[in-house]
Amino acid sequence: MHVTLKFIGHVDAEKLDSIIAALAEVRSEAPVEMRFHGVGFFPTERRPRVFWCGIEASPNLAEIASGVDGALVPLKIPAENRKFVPHLTLARFDSPHGLAKLLEAAAELQSLDLGSTREAEFHLFESILQESGAEYAKLKSFAFVKGAA
């Protein structure tokens, strides 16, 4: 599971070093505090494509997402035009098969508290699409707290 700060999309391999250099400049004064609770569906419960867990986060999570977005614009990676909504993607759906049971269970999980974490780094992942779904490979980690190496 991960919190997506920015979906970059397909980029040519020769751009990777520039992306890494740009992301290395993103900073914050403090680690991000996150609490995970509640679940829901995107776009709606009637037509779910994604099952998610909600996140309450310190304000600097949105600031870091904005910093990542802004750092990549000079590399011709378009800025995000949607508001940043932090969430954990728990599942994606290709068909409605079996969703009735999940919808029923999710209604009981609205107030479920799944714990909290404190993070001081973010990661660049490559998603590799397979027939079984996406596989993720961590390419680089970035400490974002000022003064951290």
Image (tube, rainbow, N blue to C red):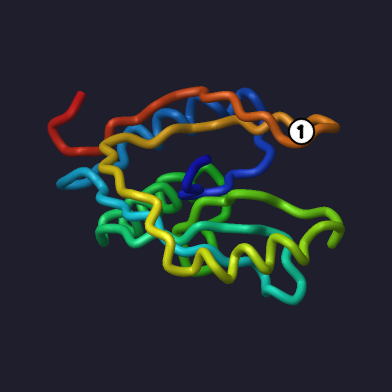
Residue at image position (77%, 66%) is 100
Q: Residue 94's x, y, as percent?
A: 83, 54
Residue 96 position in % (x across, y down): 84, 62
Q: Residue at x 68, y 67 (%)?
A: 103
At label 1, counting other C-alpha atoms closer than 10 Å, the crowd grade (few under 14, some 14-19, many 20 or more) is: few
Left or right, 137 with respect to 122, comes to right
Work out whether 17 lies above or below 25. above
Left or right: 122 in relation to 144: right
62 lies above or below 123 = below
Does dot 1 land on a helix, a strand or a loop?
Answer: strand
Residues 27 and 104: in front is 104
User: Where's residue 56, x and y in %?
Assistant: 34, 62
- Count every numbered label the image shows and give the total: 1
- Residue that badge 1 annotates: 129
Q: Nearer the viewer, residue 110 or 71?
A: 110
Kind of residue at disc 1: Leu
Q: Quadrant of residue 123?
A: top left
Residue shown at 52%/42% (left/top)?
Answer: 75
In which quadrant of the rendered image does the C terminus lie?
top left
Residue displayed at 58% across by 29% down? 15
